[in-house]
Amino acid sequence: MAGSRPRQQVRVGRLTKAHGLKGALKLELYTDDPERRFAPGAEFSLQVPTTSKWHGKSLTLTELRWYNGHPVGFFDGVDDRDEAESLVKAILWVDQDDSTEPDAWYDHQLVGLTVVRDGVDVGTVARVDHLPAQDLLAVDAGGREVLVPFVTAIVPSVDVENGIVTITPPFGLFEDIEDEEL
């Protein structure tokens, strides 16, 4: 269709190992919203080697269960352990939806943005680290990596459209602090 843009895909999980005899697979999740991403009927594009019988195919989730705190998925057409084993290490992708919250971004939208402090470029977002307490923006500041807590008090503005992340970091985050002589 003329004028339409290509669908962006987001990696949401990886199949790590077969679980039981009925085709279930343990999952490693790459999403903070598994209830929405892994709802029954969710369809996933597969990233598998070209030699895999699953190459170019997709999977539809029938059920997600939790065993000892680990997610386990059941999928259409995967009815026994042998089928499950053939999917181990497959990466699951979904189409990116544009109905996200106004203050939520995918990592790929942030990486490469210019980081600005007091109107001055101080670096570029190299990656986003997801830690239990908070996310961090890894900023390449002239060959030096600075980890910036991704919280509103320090990152008040993200303008993906114009490629700018505005920061208000505390003193010492981007500059070396000299020891005062006593």
Image (cartoon, rainbow, N blue to C red):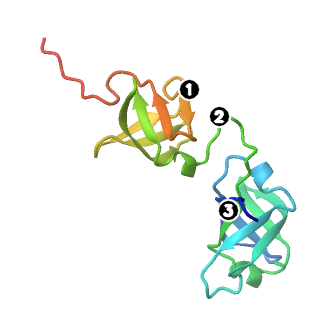
- In what element is the residue under mark 1? loop
Residue, far front: 2
The residue at which mark 2 appears reads as 103
Compared with 79, 118 (above or below) is: above
Residue, far left: 181
Residue 84, image x and y in percent?
74, 78
Q: Mark 2 is on which residue type?
A: Asp
Residue 6, label in figure: 3
Residue, far top: 182
- In what element is the residue under mark 2? loop
Marks 1,2: beta carbons within 8 A: yes
At label 3, counting other C-alpha atoms closer than 10 Å, the crowd grade (few under 14, some 14-19, many 20 or more) is few
- In what element is the residue under mark 3? loop
User: Depth check: 115 or 173 in front?
Assistant: 115
Image-quadrant location for residue 27:
bottom right
Measured in 3D between alpha carbons, the distance from the residue under mark 3 to the one under mark 2, in whole angstroms, is 23 Å
The residue at which mark 1 appears reads as 152
Measured in 3D between alpha carbons, the distance from the residue under mark 1 to the one under mark 3, in whole angstroms, is 31 Å
Q: Quadrant for the C terminus, please.
A: top left
- Count of numbered circles in the view: 3
At label 1, counting other C-alpha atoms closer than 10 Å, the crowd grade (few under 14, some 14-19, many 20 or more) is few
What residue do we see at 65% from left, 34% from top? Answer: 103
Identify the mark nearer the N-term, 1 or 2: 2
What residue do we see at 78% from left, 57% from top? Answer: 38
